[in-house]
Amino acid sequence: MWRAVGAVVAGYVVIALFVMVCFTLAWLVLGPGFAFEPGTTKVTAGWLLLATPVNLAAALLGGWTAGAVGRDGRGAAVKVLAGIVLGLGLILAFLHLGVKPALPPPGLDLSTFQAASYAIQPKWFDFFVAILGGAGVLVGGCLRSRTS
């Protein structure tokens, strides 16, 4: 039981760290001009195209980690992690439906984390990432079970 809990936590930590590192590096290298449409905090198509493989890779790594730590032939930890990723993603997507985006103060140089809090992305993308994440965790767990 504790191994399964640890596997879920480890998988989720891997997902979170991978996403934070990748988006921080992308922000530092590509800058706000790539991430946002001019004069707004609306994300560009380029940023969405970058975010898709980053989120998928994070989910695959998280699922692989949960499978490796859990070492459960049935993949219970992987399934729980996939459910958490999908469930939290869908909850956040539904919550974003009713939120009016906040705008940053004019002339503010945004840090990576500030930019993330002010970013306005299409509503459908929140749902897409939730589904992609849940599926990616399952596939990552399957990849791990095939290598063991």
Image (cartoon, rainbow, N blue to C red):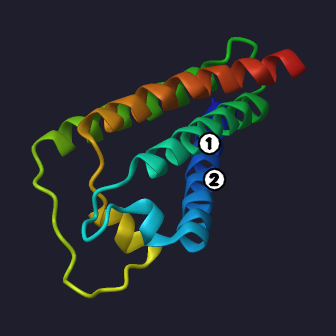
Placement of 13 over or under 33, stated as above or below: above
Looking at the image, can residue 50 be seen? yes
Task: Measuring from the top left, give residue 69's x and y in whole percent.
Answer: 76, 35
Classify the position of the C terminus by image quarter. top right
Confirm or deny contact between disc 2 and disc 1 (CB under 8 A).
yes
Placement of 36 over or under 136, stated as above or below: below
Give the residue type that dot 2 points to. Answer: Phe
Mark seen at residue 58 = 1
Task: Measuring from the top left, give residue 19's x and y in whole percent.
Answer: 57, 53
Mark seen at residue 127 = none
Nearer-N-terminus badge (2/1): 2
The answer to which image quadrant residue 53 occupies is: top right
Mark seen at residue 18 = 2
The answer to which image quadrant residue 48 occupies is: top left
Near mark 2 (Cα within 10 A), the count class, few <14, some 14-19 or many ≥20, is some
Q: Residue at x 31, y 67 (%)?
A: 38
Classify the position of the N terminus by image quarter. top right
Q: Secondary structure at mark 1?
A: helix
> Observer-nearest residue: 93 or 63?
93
Task: Measuring from the top left, give residue 110's x and y in whole percent.
Answer: 37, 79
Q: Secondary structure at mark 2?
A: helix
Give the residue type that dot 1 points to. Answer: Ala
